[in-house]
Image: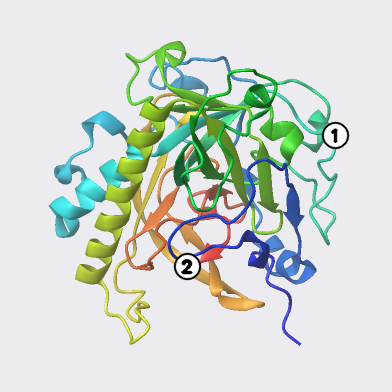
């Protein structure tokens, strides 16, 4: 009998709408021993930035970076153009796609480590990241991206009949907000393990250059729900916000990214009758958007060298690639040109391969 798919509980629908009740806090840490046996072989050095200050300068901090001295291969997000791409991929649509993806990429900071973190990976004797920090408030930073945005107004939405915002603040208020948004953020499980950590997590947006100050940037604070697949190292956080301007901007950028993702996929990949790529190894271009060292947003470019299919379902994969990364890149979106699928980016960056320090790897996701 096939092993259970640990992602089944996520309840993804093609129209990108969640059928969950946002009034309820619902944590789910899915696990599969079969996944652990498969994925554990490729576990490497995870790339959360631990104990960093709130704002640092990437280019003055380069001397202390042991992995990538000088930070070669990072392009500031606001300087990325079509000419930043490899010569044979200098396509305006690809450049616009990555720019749209950068707009929905967030800097993630966590100020608490849950006592519920396991000591070891499921089914192994390998220590779980930050297990030695349980119960501590030591800061760590990483990356993530917008996975979904839903904006609500009064009781007009067919999936939410409440007339006021369901957040805890509004529940206690005599004048609750009548317009609110629900924003899901995707990252890696080793970044945000559960709701105890999610409640202490902040996502900053549009941190695109060193002239920005985090205090001046729009942000989301305190996830109300965390859904993890521990073995696949995938995490989805849910936030409720009253900042409709931010929600609308992120929603528009997300829609632009999805439109370009489909257009680029159709241009570069051969598909079968179900719309899935059949020439998946023809284009190995692999791009990551992230916040290395908790600094301003950077884009790095490489190619994947290996694509592993999971034994419980060959639709679920992980990638190994040459794309440059550093601590703080954990959880950032990994864009693979030949991974054409209607959903868009699903693979969070994981870390550096132990067996080859020149290679990095992703978490598990579809295709």
User: Compared to 82, does 66 lie above or below?
Assistant: above
Query: Residue 271 versus residue 87: which sits nearer the camera?
Result: 271
- N-terminal-most mark, 1 or 2: 1
User: Residue, x 57% and y 32% (percent of image)?
Assistant: 165
Provide the secondary structure element on which disc 1 rests: loop
State the residue position of label 2.
Answer: 306
User: Residue, x 41% and y 38% (percent of image)?
Assistant: 105
**Image quadrant where residue 239 sits:** top right
Residue 27, x across and y down, in percent: 74, 47
The N terminus is located in which quarter?
A: bottom right
Provide the secondary structure element on which disc 2 rests: strand
Q: Residues within 10 Å of mark 2 (few under 14, many from 20)?
A: few
State the residue position of label 1.
Answer: 115
User: Compared to 220, does 186 lie above or below?
Assistant: below
**Image quadrant where residue 138 sits:** top right
Residue 236, x across and y down, in percent: 59, 47
- Spatial CA distance of label 1 from label 2 is 35 Å
């Amino acid at each position: 009998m096939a092993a259970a798919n640990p992602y089944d509980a996520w309840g993804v629908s093609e129209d990108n709408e969640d059928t969950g009740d946002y009034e309820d806090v619902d944590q789910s840490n899915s696990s599969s021993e079969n996944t652990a046996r498969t994925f554990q072989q490729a576990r490497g050095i995870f790339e959360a930035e631990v104990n960093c200050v709130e704002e640092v300068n990437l280019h003055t901090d380069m001397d202390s970076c042991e992995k990538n001295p000088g930070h070669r291969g990072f392009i500031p997000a606001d300087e990325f153009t079509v000419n930043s791409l490899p010569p044979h991929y200098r396509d305006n649509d690809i450049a616009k796609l990555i720019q749209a993806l950068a707009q929905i990429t967030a800097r993630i900071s966590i100020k608490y480590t849950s006592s519920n973190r396991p000591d070891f990976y499921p089914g192994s004797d390998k220590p779980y990241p930050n297990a030695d920090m349980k119960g501590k408030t030591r800061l760590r930073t990483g990356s993530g991206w917008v996975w979904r945005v839903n904006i609500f107004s009064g009781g007009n939405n067919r999936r939410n009949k409440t007339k006021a915002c369901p957040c805890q603040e509004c529940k206690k208020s005599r004048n609750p907000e009548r317009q609110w948004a629900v924003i899901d953020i995707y990252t890696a499980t080793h970044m945000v393990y559960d709701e105890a950590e999610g409640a202490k997590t902040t996502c900053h947006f549009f941190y695109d250059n060193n002239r920005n100050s985090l205090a001046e940037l729009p942000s989301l604070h305190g996830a109300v729900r965390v859904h993890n697949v521990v073995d696949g190292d995938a995490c989805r956080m849910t936030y409720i916000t009253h900042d409709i301007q931010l929600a609308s901007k992120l929603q528009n950028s997300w829609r632009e990214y999805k439109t370009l993702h489909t257009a680029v996929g159709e241009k570069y990949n051969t598909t079968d009758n179900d719309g899935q790529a059949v020439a998946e190894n023809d284009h190995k271009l692999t791009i990551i958007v992230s916040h290395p060292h908790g600094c301003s947003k950077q884009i790095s470019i490489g190619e994947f060298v290996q694509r592993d299919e999971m034994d419980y379902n060959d639709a679920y994969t992980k990638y190994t690639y040459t794309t440059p990364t550093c601590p703080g890149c954990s959880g950032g979106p990994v864009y693979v040109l030949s991974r054409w699928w209607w959903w868009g980016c699903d693979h969070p960056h994981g870390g550096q391969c132990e067996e080859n320090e020149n290679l990095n790897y992703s978490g598990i996701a579809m295709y």
